[in-house]
Amino acid sequence: MSLKVAIQMDPIESIDIDGDSTFVLGLEAQARGHALWHYLPRDLSLRDRKVVAWARPLTLKREKGAHFTLGEPTLLDLGRDVDVVLMRQDPPFDMAYITATHLLEHIHPKTLVVNDPVSVRNAPEKLFVTHFDGVMPPTLITARMEDIVAFRAEHEDIIVKPLYGNGGAGVFHLKPGDENLASLMEMFTARSREPVIVQRYLPEVRQGDKRIILVDGEPVGAVNRVPAAGESRSNMHVGGKPVKSGLTAREKEICAIIGPTLKNQGMIFVGIDVIGDYLTEINVTSPTGIQQINRFDGVKLEGLVWDAIEARRSA
């Protein structure tokens, strides 16, 4: 099977080839004989009900400073000229991101979009978790200051973060007695009309925030991310340290609860975040973690992702 694969992502020149999951997905596709094309989200258009993109032929190699070659831009009809679109641009999950899902909806599933653009649009990472029973820590989503004050009075130690944030940006840990809640909410309100998400602080985060990769609803690997000293966020770009990890019985239970829904909704490649016994996020937009798990476990998760994509294409 030889496929024509268009990768919708951020600028290829800016990626970290030692950590980027899209890079190894592209390398694996190339090794299987699939043709690669690259385009930016702003190069995607809808004209006369045809979804097109100014895309460039892409060749990848694992060589720092020379990891890609791009050909001349060509106007591709994504519904006619392409077999698979990988929607891999990073959040924020804003109106530009949502608009891209609406455009790609026109071509899916004739052209397989990974992940399903309708499901991506309907699954903001912090909201999607709320559809599953028994997996979340105590959580409040609201714009009402009175409700946040009451939640804090009940749980005392809390986390406040933007509902559509990513990468640990704007995440605040308010300990008992911290007097900054009102000022913090003023800042959030000035920045956005969106509600915030408030959760009971989980002290287990000091032992790590685990990223688990699921392919077609099945867990295939995990990496623990331990926060730096004095930091409540475990994201690796803010100093979190990746540590080899397997899956606990509770984590397997969480995967069994959410896995069938992910598979049924066309979520081929998903990353979930687990702290202690609780699921905090389901990342369906542009999940990461493949390369870290590959190095720790001696596996090749990108191969499993492509096995699933090829199986869907041949079904």
Image (spheres, grey):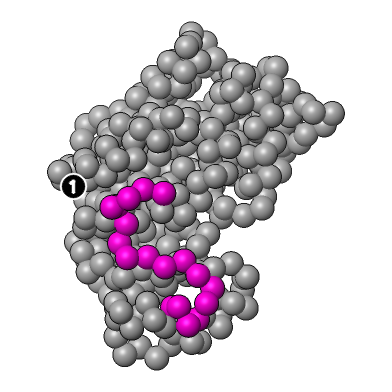
Toward the right, the furthest residue is: 48
Toward the top, the furthest residue is: 1
Observer-nearest residue: 33 or 194? 194
Q: Which residues are magenta?
A: 131-148
- Measured as percent of width and height from the top left, residue 2 is found at 52, 10
Q: Secondary structure at mark 1?
A: helix
Q: Is residue 134 magenta?
A: yes
Q: Amino acid at mark 1?
A: Arg
Observer-nearest residue: 28 or 196? 196
In-image side of 82 versus 212 (left or right): right
Q: Is residue 309 magenta?
A: no
Residue pictured at 47% horizontal, 18% vertical: 312
**Which quarter of the picture shows residue 76?**
top right
In-image side of 132 versus 169 (left or right): left
Residue pictured at 33% horizontal, 83% vertical: 153
In-image side of 261 versus 192 (left or right): left
- Measured as percent of width and height from the top left, residue 74 is found at 74, 25
- Measured as percent of width and height from the top left, residue 308 is found at 40, 22
Quickly name the residue at label 1: 250
Residue pictured at 56% horizontal, 55% vertical: 92
Is residue 94 positioned above or below 117 on the image? below
Is residue 183 positioned above or below 239 on the image? below
Residue pictured at 65% horizontal, 32% vertical: 105
- Measured as percent of width and height from the top left, residue 233 is found at 34, 65
**Which quarter of the picture shows residue 189?**
bottom right
